[in-house]
Amino acid sequence: MRVTILGGHYAPEPTGNGPYTAGLANGLVARRHDVRVITTHPDYPEWRVTEGSGGWSVSDEVDGVRVQRLAHYVPARPIGGRRLLSELSLGIRFLTARWHRPDVVLLVSPNLIASALAALRARRSRGHATGIWIQNLYSLGITETGQGGRSAATALKALESRTLRSATGVVVIHDRFHSFVTETLGVPTGRVEVIRNWSHVDPPMEVDRAAVRNRRGWDPDVTVILHAGNMGAKQGLENVVEAARLADRQRAPVRFVLLGDGNECARLHSLARNVTSIEFVAPLPDDEFRQTLGSADILLVNERAGMKEMSVPSKLKTYFSTSLPVLAATDEASVTASEIDAAGGGTRVAAAILRPCWMPPSRSRQIQRGRAPLGRQDAATPSWRRMRRSTTLNSGWWLWPRGVTA
């Protein structure tokens, strides 16, 4: 079949939807489908176009996938009207791009405004099916992050409902998303499929922890609590800065590391001025990233209070692959909490109450001694087994396009 995928992120962006969209496109090409991707220039999570990229419309072929990258407005801080303008500009580019007469058009959201405009064109076209892949629930995100008022949330919920109901088929990445999409947004159950995200990280690698920690300047007797990925509104990382400030006052042997970038990064740097128990690390190449991750003591998921339903942190699968303990500062009723509980790979504390929860070095070393050696035995740990199960569900994607065209 001819499949055209439209979405706001694509590899080589290391986080967000990019790796999943690329993985799907590559998998479809391997199964002899003709795949085109229409997307943006790399700009995530920094919210600025990567140096060396750009141009009104640039086409290339990557691993057998024809990729067309379109310029659109990229705000330094994607909030309020600037976020709306960014999505509108992308949606207009989608409206006017050539779709190359596909059998299936797949729209990747959380770019709801852009997806809604593309869905409008799809409804007026004939000869193809339209699928929408929901990575984040947009209307819930506005409510849970507190970035819009009640009127904005109501309008976006109506738009999200109309857009999803117009599709031939909808894919969601979690059962809780399925419930919201069918029960609240009114999409018929028969048109909604749950296909969980798979792991896009390699299996556990051997890590010389002492060498990596020495290279990074991490004292062997200090507990390193590391958060990796986007630094945006929904992560609520001000909480981590305050935890580090408290560690300074108590002279606690703990170091918080924020690895990545995002639209809140500059503000977090400002908040953390003169705080010595926190460190910011820019995004790293893949191998160095995995080694740094594997050399921490505790891996942190931190979510703003009130975040419950809108998203499933993709970082969890990456974290689980290390077999390190995971600490999740999140609401008890959140999707993240349910994933931690199902995996058996971590501990949850209430959102915004991270401060008393670090482990002393003695406990951290005890955990390290109790771990299975890296290698085949790691596949038996609950969190790694859980990640491997989610990978097999990716096979649903190879049948789904045929289902929506039937």
Image: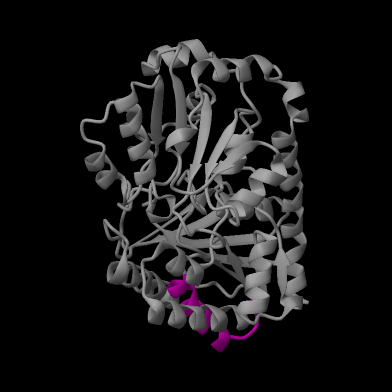
78 relative to 17 in the view: left or right: left
Quadrant showing the C terminus? bottom right
User: In the drawing, does residue 232 fall left or right of residue 326?
Assistant: left
The answer to whether residue 217 is above or below residue 179 is: above
Direction bottom: furthest residue: 124
Query: Which colour assignment does the render follow?
Result: one colour
Left or right of residue 311: residue 382? right
Whether the magenta-drawn stretch holds residue 113 is answered as yes
Residue 176 shows in the view = yes
Q: Is residue 198 visible?
A: no
Q: x%, y% of residue 8?
A: 45, 61
Vertical position of residue 260 compared to residue 322: above or below: below
Location of residue 45 with respect to 69 vertically, above or below: above
Toward the viewer: 279 or 71? 279
Query: Residue at (73%, 41%) from the top-left corner?
Result: 386
Q: Main secondary structure of the magenta part?
A: helix
Q: Quadrant of the N terminus?
A: bottom right
Q: Is 387 contained in the magenta span? A: no
- Report which quarter residue 385 is drawn in: top right
Q: Which residues are magenta?
A: 112-130
- State the image coordinates of residue 395 (x, y, percent, origin top left): 76, 53
Q: x and y percent of residue 150 in the render?
A: 40, 78
The foreground one among 21 and 301 is: 301
Q: Residue at x 63, y 71 (%)?
A: 180
Most foreground residue, 110 or 34: 110
Q: Nearer the viewer, residue 194 or 330?
A: 330
Q: Is residue 69 above or below residue 241?
A: below
Q: Quarter of the image holding residue 91?
A: bottom left
Residue drawn at (28%, 68%), measured in percent from left and top? 82
